[in-house]
Amino acid sequence: MAGSGFFRFSSPASFYPLAGRLVPVFGWLAAALTVAGLYIGFAVAPTDFQQGEAYRIIFIHVPAAWMAMFTYLVIAGWSAASFVWNTRLSAMMAQALAPTGAMFAFISLWSGAFWGRPTWGTYWVWDARLTSTLILLFLYIGLMALRATIEDPRRADRACAVLALVGSVNVPIIYFSVQWWNTLHQGASVSLTAAPKMAETMLAGMLVMGLAAWAYTIAAALHRVRSIILEREAHARWTRELVR
Amino acid sequence: MIEWLSMGGYAYYVWMSYGALAIAIVAELFALAGRRRRALEQLAEHAQEDAFEEQAA
Amino acid sequence: MSDADVADRLEVEDLACAAGIRTLFQGIGFSLGPGQWIQLGGPNGCGKSTLLRALAGLVRPLAGSIRWRGEPVSQARERWHAAIAFQGHLPGCKDTLGAAENLRWQLLLDGEPAGPARLGELLAQVGLERQARLAYQRLSAGQRRRLGLARLVASRRPLWLLDEPTTALDAAGQALFGEILDRHLGDGGLAICATHLELPVRSPAIRLELGGRPRA
Amino acid sequence: MNAGAAIAWGLRRDLALAMRSRAEVAIVLAFFLLVTSMFPLGLEPDPALLSKIAPGIAWVAALLASLLGLPRLFAGDHADGSLEQLALADAPLPALVAGKVLAHWVATGLPLVLLAPLAGIQFGLEPAAIGILVATLALGTPVLAWLGAIGAALTLGTRGGAALLALLVLPLAVPVLVFGAGAVESSRAGLGAQAHLSLLGAGAILSMVFGPFVTALAVRISFE
């Protein structure tokens, strides 16, 4: 399938070297953005009037939550693409993104807990955002578990694609239902991002860290997809050349 | 420096969060490297198997 | 295009299938017309069952085309399914239901008449008249195969895809299978049988050994 | 076979099979009542507390009970090859699947709806609230059946078993749980259950429109 233009890279054989060149680019970009983000977060942004230094946790909590949510949608997008164009690479990308997305969901929950303790006095509150992130983490775990229990990789691709698409339709509904449930039971609770006045530096720090998370996710997914390609194409001639 | 590390009394919470992120990322980097190493090993094994089969044929 | 204009013909070109990450077979091609049948051979694990499942449409092939009456089967799935009777190595029968009851649900699914008289007649033809009410799990392996034959006797589908149709059948049962298949072929039917046994069928088979080329 | 005949075939066949294994169906119902009976024992028999948590407990028990029955839906047919014959039938697979899921709901979902008042009485719910609980279960159990059917079809022949099925289905069922249990509470708080019931109804319609196609796709994938 040696097509031209964009679809040329939908073949694993031609994507493998391209991904290899992109991994260090995004990796270093992620490192540079992280340094910049941490500098803003710890050195530039002033101490919060109400929360003291504890609020600095949001520089990882919020970007991690964004990234977890967004990565799931990207997985759903690749899954849809794998159905529409029947491209193997799309399914491999979906597979490669899942562990990193799950990692960010976990970090979001963990840092949320350690932000909640000094702020709300408890590690866990059934806040709408935290609860939906918890369910999102379960969706990720389900996706990876389904992948792990299916022997045949092509079957696993398609089964996981169906699950990811059903899940992505459900994510907004889950979020909406949890939000509703939350307001019914506790009234409006303090939300992490709805701090009274979000200072501009705070927003800037969060955005830079968000971009760092983006670059990191891309780099990690590309690196992982290279391994997946090698696993899947172990019998193809071109992978043989790599070990000769 | 010590004062900065103490995070105005919130050191435990702040560093538990950032520490977890650091550990998670390092763990993922190790997992990525391990997966690539295993993929290459598997590739070498398959190549050897096929070489045997070719010789046998 | 009316049905009469196009002959029943199965054309397979350059078919390839995989198991896991390994390619099982590739470059399989043949053409099968009315009254012809293929005896599909090859060692265990060479992909005989997978080939049948790919033809039926259960497994997606890696490459290649399958055309029925000139039309790619993937584009007309229901018409294709209306043309085939597939019997894999799994019986498709429920343990708790009786022989006649199992046959009845299968015939209804196939769109064949399935009244009590018809069921009795079919079971008698395969020598199961006395087992009609016996639960499927109490039938012997050979009797189960015979129940599968009853479905074929009733079937008006032109193409039969059969996976090891005679295993566990006694000599009389194998002869019965041969008769049934010969009658089907005589009526202008087509069949592909994956088997490692010699089948007592009078019509000459096209032999297809997986990994090899078809010989007449 | 057209779609209507296919639905009827799946429904009648699976009901006939369910009649043969009534015991397995009864176990699901016993499980539901058992779970709801455990909560007062684990907490305290304080009527105020019990009637407050009743809707949530009835719904969680219904969720678990419907999970318990799910492996019956496709796994047996997959193991004995009948599912292959369904997939190869000259009938739309979504319709055949719809018939099967409908039969599954009649065998395991509908009895839960009918048993719910019993759980309501156990927990001292007032009659109006019991009525709403029954209505939410009637609208919600079809959604659970379809979500479960998708999960059951996706996990066919995998090594994950019932635990994997629960892992896949429960997170997706969160909205049903929230709106189902929320309806009863909202009506007891005097806010009315109209909105919750409409949302559950919308969910039921959506799941019935898309469920058959997604499930049929998952069934086809299970053969690859």
Image (spheres, rainbow, N blue to C red):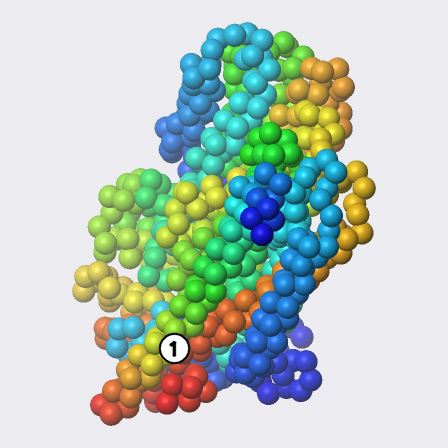
Which structural element holds mark 1? helix
Above or below, C26 relative to D134:
below
Front one among B1 and D185: B1
- The residue carrying mark 1 is B40
Residue D157 percent across, percent down from the top left? 39, 54
- The residue at the point 60 percent across, 72 percent down is A28
Quarter of the figure with the C terminus of chain D: bottom left
Residue A181 percent across, percent down from the top left? 68, 30
How many C-alpha atoms fall within 10 Å of the one at disc 1: few (<14), some, or many (≥20)? some
Rendered image quadrant of residue C150? bottom left
Front one among C154 and D154: D154
- The residue at the point 30 percent across, 67 percent down is C164
- The residue at the point 55 percent across, 67 percent down is A221
- The residue at the point 48 percent across, 46 percent down is D152
The residue furthest left is C171
Residue B55 percent across, percent down from the top left? 24, 92
Q: In this view, does A173 lie to the left or right of C163?
A: right
- Amino acid type, mark 1: Leu
Q: In this view, does C104 lie to the left or right of B55?
A: right
